[in-house]
Structure formats: C-alpha cells, structure tokens
Image: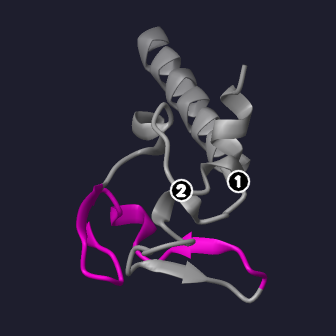
Amino acid sequence: MENDRQQEVYQNHLADKEREWENQCLRCGACCGAYEDPCRDLKKGPDGKYSCGVYFRRYGAHETVGGKKFRCMPIRDIIHMSWDHDQFCAYKQAIKP
C-alpha cells in the first residue's frame, strides 16, 4: 500500500510540474511559425494569443499553411535550437544565462 501511495504522490508531482511548465507559455505562437509560415493547426484568438487546434494530439507529422511538412515535438526537445522570433518565447527567456 505504501508503494501505491508513493506512486500517487509522484504522479501528482509530475502533473503539477506539467501545469507549471504549461503556464509559462505566453501563447506567442513563435515556435509554431506564427510570424512566417505557420502550422495549419495554429489558431489566433480574439485576444491576439495563439493556441494549437489539435493540442492533445499535436506531436507528429503536420503541415504549414504554405505546405511545408514538419514534425511537431515537445518544446523541451527544441528549446536549445533557434527559430524566427524565438525572442518572444517565455521558455527561451527563462533559460537565458
């Protein structure tokens, strides 16, 4: 039973960390190409912020509005790379030295 409780605590911790990570995002859309050739699934809200129309199944093969094929992946896998307008990305700002 103690092992089950530890597993539950750990899963709750992971869920909290995931929410914390997600809440850092400013919804600028830069990582999804908002300022050049955006992903077809990128949606701009009335508040000017962006969101993914297929967020819970976003990873994998996608296409930009211009027809370029690409693979969407977790931001943590590409955070060390550069892309156009990445200076707007809250995740990139958080890891700056």
State yes or no: residue 68 in magenta.
yes
The magenta region covers 47-71
**Would you name the residue on which mark 2 appears?**
84
Q: x%, y% of residue 63?
A: 27, 74
Q: Nearer the viewer, residue 91 or 34?
A: 34
Amino acid type for the residue under numbered disc 2: Asp
Outermost residue toward the bottom in this view: 46
How crowded is the residue under tag 1: few (<14 C-alpha within 10 Å), some, or many (20+)?
some
- Is disc 1 placed on a helix, strand or loop? helix
Outermost residue toward the right in this view: 47
Relative placement, left or right, of 57 versus 55 is left
Q: Is residue 22 visible?
A: yes
Q: x%, y% of residue 86?
A: 60, 50
Q: Quadrant of the C terminus?
A: top right
Q: Nearer the viewer, residue 68 or 17?
A: 68
Query: Which residue is depicted at the point 64% across and 45% down?
Result: 19
Of labels 2 and 1, the one closer to you: 2
Query: Which residue is depicted at the point 78% across and 82% down?
Result: 47
How crowded is the residue under tag 2: few (<14 C-alpha within 10 Å), some, or many (20+)?
few
Outermost residue toward the top in this view: 2
Q: Is residue 93 above or below residue 52?
A: above
- Name the disc covering residue 88, or none: 1
- Is disc 2 placed on a helix, strand or loop? loop
Amino acid type for the residue under numbered disc 1: Phe
Q: Quadrant of the N terminus?
A: top left
Q: Is residue 61 visible?
A: no
